[in-house]
DNA sequence: CTTAAAAATAGGAATCATTACTATTATGGG
DNA sequence: CCCATAATAGTAATGATTCCTATTTTTAAG
């Protein structure tokens, strides 16, 4: 149960911290192999999940069906370009008030919300 | 290209209209087989996708990794119970204003948003 | 430093939802 | 009634992710 250091986990987290485009496990794998040629894909998956579970990274799910990972664990929102698929961080205040709106006619306990936006990104709009 | 009637598609849509719990393709398959014993799972998937594409039903994605389907095509929000997994419709106004909030410091074009809520449903809170 | 228990790994097999393929059947306009 | 085409059943393939196991690493304790 106690967590032990592993160089692979370190390399995975270090790589993720250099990126702000929320890569998938496979992208992490491809890149980390440069520095650690015989790391296995299973190890990448296992460590990404582990890091997400202990809150050191964030797992993101949009509608492409693959998990994305983000070293920025602060609560923030994302925009997904429906043309190029790019995922962009949005600078905006928390939308916590929408949970109050949702709770007004609901008898359960609302503890969180998942929100992301989609449309055409700046680059794609030019072409 | 022209759409032709199929009894299987009709049965699938009819079944979906009787449910308000947003079943998965597999659940649709299991139930539709009562009325149409040798329908194939592929047919269920193909028709659910087709119906979603032409806007007759809605495809919903939460974080369980499986697609859910909803015969109610009006824009509305959902609550996912993290204990029992139940998905519940929420009666609340549209949150379109959050797209304006998101667009304030963003140079692309925001066309839509995906939002759902999670927590503990009323039934689960009692136990 | 040595040892040993626990954790982690590499590599590959297994799983699960979903899509693709293909020979056959159903639909519907002329 | 015909026939072009859409749709189907059944099955194979795909792709992301998880699981399994023998081996290697880590680390706390002597």
Image (cartoon, coloured by chain):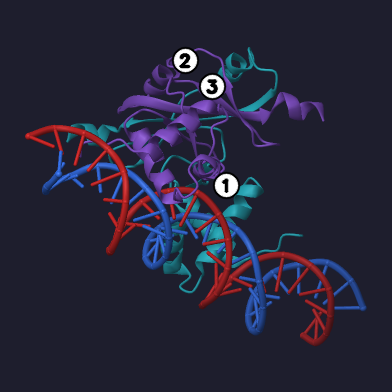
Chain colours: A cyan, B purple, C red, D blue
**Residue B12 as seen in the image, left or right of residue A127:** right
Identify the element where label 2 is drawn. Answer: loop
Q: Are marks 2 and 1 on the same chain?
A: no
Q: Are marks 3 and 1 on the same chain?
A: yes
Q: Residue at x 49, y 27 (%)?
A: B17
Q: Position of residue A11 (x, y in %)?
A: 53, 62
Using the image, tell me which numbered label, if any, was put on residue B23: none
Where is C1 relative to A43, above or below? below
Q: Which chain hosts label 2?
A: B
Q: Position of residue A43 (x, y in %)?
A: 56, 65
Identify the element where label 1 is drawn. Answer: loop
Nearest-to-viewer mark from 3 and 2 = 2
Q: Can residue B124 be seen?
A: yes
Q: Which chain hosts label 1?
A: A
**Residue B81 as seen in the image, left or right of residue A81:** right
Instruction: Classify residue A94 by image quadrant.
Output: top right
Q: Disc 2 and disc 1: Cα gap in Å?
A: 31 Å
Between C26 and B77, which is closer to the camera in this rendering?
Answer: C26
Between D2 and B53, which is closer to the camera in this rendering?
Answer: D2
Q: Pointer 1: what residue?
A: A57
Identify the element where label 3 is drawn. Answer: loop
**Residue C23 as seen in the image, left or right of residue D24:** left
Where is A103 relative to A14, above or below? above
Using the image, tell me which numbered label, if any, was put on residue A95: 3
Quadrant the N terminus of chain A occupies: bottom right
Task: Characterize the local packing of mark 1: few (<14), some (14-19) or many (20 or more) Cα atoms within 10 angstroms.
Answer: many
Where is D25 relative to A19, above or below? below
Q: Pointer 2: what residue?
A: B94
């Amino acid at each position: 149960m106690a967590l032990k250091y592993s160089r692979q986990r370190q390399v995975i987290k270090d790589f993720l911290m250099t990126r702000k485009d929320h890569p998938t496990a496979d992208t992490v794998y491809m890149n980390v192999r440069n520095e650690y040629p015989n790391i296995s894909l299973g190890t990448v998956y296992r460590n990404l999940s582990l890091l997400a579970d202990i809150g050191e990274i964030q797992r993101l799910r949009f509608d492409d069906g693959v998990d994305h990972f983000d070293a920025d664990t602060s609560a923030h929102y994302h925009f997904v370009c429906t043309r190029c698929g790019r995922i962009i961080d949005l600078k905006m205040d928390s939308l916590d008030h929408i949970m109050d709106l949702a709770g007004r006619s609901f008898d359960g306990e609302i503890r969180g919300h998942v929100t992301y936006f989609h449309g055409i990104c700046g680059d794609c709009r030019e072409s």
